[in-house]
Image: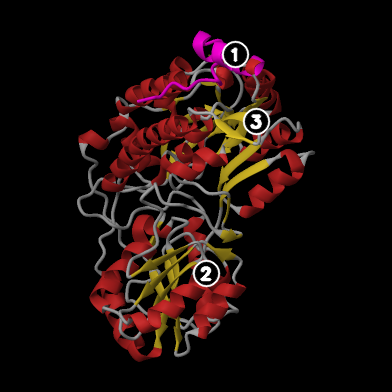
């Protein structure tokens, strides 16, 4: 069914008054003018009464030569460990980061506006993404200060004195996702930088223009070559960089197929550290004694926040037979009451999908499920208009359906009923994914043993709440195809660094040398200064 979507005039404060032509890229501390081909950047949001995608601007279509220049720049800045940035005092790297984030905050309005236009994220969530990113940077700075304070001492064991700190790994290739093109990307970029690594960064395909207002700040506050920013197709740029064998860390949030392909192109895989946030198929398990009011609200938030385009979204719901009918009736009604519209409209919950081909994909999942015996439970489910698809609740879903197997990353909610808890547990054990789960129920006698099993299948068990990433201080990772390494404020600093130390035998000569080093400030590594 085709939806009747009535065009509303765009409020003046959210209009894009001019197109953004990103005509340069950042390499070796310089904004290099590009005079080659450009790629247009469109929004799937129409700015006219007759629907058509809106041209937002254009970006350089960089190629292999530019990729290698960025790689050489990052390698030279690291300079085999001798570079200014990796050998800099911790306090000076922190100061550079503080100066960067202060300038970043001045660009809030334009970045928020571009988040709405580029990826269709509603106004409130776009503001939250920006503010959360700023908070993440400050939290990372404070966490690094703590690490440094804890390291500002010598240890002595078996006649050996040691000064142990965390050091950089080298060159990092950073590739972020479109659904959180600022926050998730910076959760890779910021800890990689502050630990002393040099970085090659390619923004996501959708959400690329929002880097434009920030590129000058990267140039201004970090030494030449420390941050290199490329624009263009991921495979075109990332593949030759990886094939060089000079990348020490692949930091990627995206699909496992991309991660596997890039990893395979590296000639020295044993030298490559992976920091990956990948797919998930997070289930909700609803027990008979669940509070339905709470459960329905959490399942709506979990499955449809940002149209379900989150790795932490609830992507399949297991409902106990005892309360199945009651749940589906109320859940369907609640989903159908959600307001849809453009991102700047008041109280809008459902927005246009940023990927041009995503509506067709969503409709193909729905058709496949219906062909194999599922029904759309909610009245509005599956109706569409251009780039918008109303969420469809599908029941009963079976293992032969694509929506069961694939991470839908959009407004489709598959539902499976059960009367034996082993059903969802066995499905989770067989799944390729293992990020999070949400469990809804009240009885501790039943919840306890269930939790003890679930913690061995996923990395976060949420009790009577939807899956989520935050707070950022908590570990964010996953099993199997869901993640590699751990991203959070605390853990990310460790993911992008390695323990390294200076050791000396405990004798008078060595001790005098250490004293001289501490007193003279000839070494930035050997220091017992505290950072407050």
Disc 2 vs disc 1: Cβ atoms closer than 8 Å? no
Q: Name the residue under label 2.
A: 365
Mark 2 vs 1, N-terminal side: 2
Q: Does the magenta stretch include residue 172?
A: no
Mark 1 vs 3, N-terminal side: 3
> In this rendering, does residue 149 appear at all?
yes
Mark 2 to mark 1 CA distance (whole Å): 71 Å
Q: Mark 1 points at which residue?
A: 512
Left or right? Give the position of 519 relative to 76: left
The residue lying at 58 percent from left, 33 percent from top is 156
In the image, residue 331 sits, relative to residue 483, either above or below, namely below
Q: Magenta region: which residues?
A: 509-532
- Dot 2 alpha-carbon crowd within 10 angstroms: few under 14, some 14 to 19, many 20 or more: many
In the image, residue 464 sits, relative to residue 488, either above or below, namely below
Mark 2 vs 3, N-terminal side: 3
Residue furthest right in the image? 267
**In front here: 305 or 344?**
305
Left or right? Give the position of 206 relative to 67: left
Nearest to the eye among marks 2 and 3: give it.
Answer: 3
Mark 2 to mark 3 CA distance (whole Å): 63 Å
Question: Which labelled disc corresponds to residue 160?
Answer: 3
- Dot 3 alpha-carbon crowd within 10 angstroms: few under 14, some 14 to 19, many 20 or more: few
Residue 172 drawn at (x, y percent): 61, 33
Mark 1 to mark 3 CA distance (whole Å): 14 Å
Quarter of the image with the N terminus is bottom left
Q: Does the magenta stretch include residue 511?
A: yes
């Amino acid at each position: 069914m085709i939806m009747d979507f009535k065009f509303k005039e765009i409020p003046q404060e959210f209009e894009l008054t001019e197109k953004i032509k990103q005509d340069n890229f950042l390499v070796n501390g310089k904004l290099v003018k590009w005079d080659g081909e450009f790629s247009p950047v469109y929004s799937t949001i129409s700015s006219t009464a007759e629907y058509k995608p809106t041209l937002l601007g254009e970006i350089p279509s960089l190629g292999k030569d530019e990729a290698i220049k960025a790689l050489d720049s990052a390698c030279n800045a690291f300079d085999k460990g001798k570079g200014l940035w990796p050998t800099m005092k911790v306090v000076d790297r922190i100061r550079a980061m503080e100066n960067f984030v202060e300038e970043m905050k001045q660009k809030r309005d334009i970045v928020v506006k571009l988040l709405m236009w580029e990826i269709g994220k509603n106004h409130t969530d776009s503001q939250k993404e920006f503010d959360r990113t700023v908070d993440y940077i400050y939290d990372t700075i404070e966490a690094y200060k703590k690490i440094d304070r804890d390291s500002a001492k010598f240890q002595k064991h078996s006649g050996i004195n040691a000064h142990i700190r965390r050091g950089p790994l080298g060159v990092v290739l950073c590739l972020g996702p479109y659904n959180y093109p600022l926050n998730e990307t910076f959760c890779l970029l910021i800890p990689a930088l502050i630990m002393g690594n040099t970085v090659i960064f390619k923004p996501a395909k959708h959400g690329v223009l929002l880097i434009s207002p920030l590129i000058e700040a990267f140039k201004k506050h970090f030494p030449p070559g420390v941050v290199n920013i490329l624009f263009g197709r991921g495979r075109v740029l990332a593949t030759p960089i990886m094939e060089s064998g000079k990348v020490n860390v692949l930091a990627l949030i995206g699909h496992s197929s991309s991660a596997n392909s890039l990893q395979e192109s590296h000639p020295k895989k044993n030298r490559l550290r992976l920091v990956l946030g990948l797919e998930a198929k997070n289930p909700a398990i609803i027990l008979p004694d669940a509070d339905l009011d709470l459960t329905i609200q959490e399942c709506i938030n979990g499955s449809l926040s940002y149209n379900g385009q989150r790795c932490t979204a609830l992507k399949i719901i297991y409902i106990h037979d005892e309360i199945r009918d009651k749940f589906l009736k109320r859940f369907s009604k609640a989903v159908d009451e959600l307001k849809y519209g453009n991102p700047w409209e008041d109280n809008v919950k459902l927005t246009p999908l940023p990927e041009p081909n995503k509506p067709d994909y969503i409709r193909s999942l729905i058709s496949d499920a219906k062909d194999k015996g599922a029904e759309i439970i909610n009245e509005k489910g599956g109706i569409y208009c251009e780039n918008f698809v109303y969420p469809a609740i599908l029941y009963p879903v079976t293992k032969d359906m694509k929506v069961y197997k694939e991470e839908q990353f959009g407004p489709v909610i598959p539902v499976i009923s059960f009367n034996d808890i082993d059903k969802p547990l066995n499905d989770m054990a067989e799944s390729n994914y293992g990020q999070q789960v949400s469990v809804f129920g009240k009885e501790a006698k039943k919840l306890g043993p269930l939790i003890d099993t679930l913690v061995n299948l996923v990395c976060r068990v949420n009790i009577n709440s939807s899956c989520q990433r935050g707070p950022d201080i908590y570990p964010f990772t996953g099993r199997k195809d869901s993640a590699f390494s751990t991203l959070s404020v605390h853990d990310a600093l460790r993911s992008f660094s390695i323990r390294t130390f200076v050791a000396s035998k405990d004798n008078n000569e060595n001790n005098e040398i250490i004293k001289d080093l501490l007193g003279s400030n000839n070494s930035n590594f050997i220091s017992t200064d505290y950072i407050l």
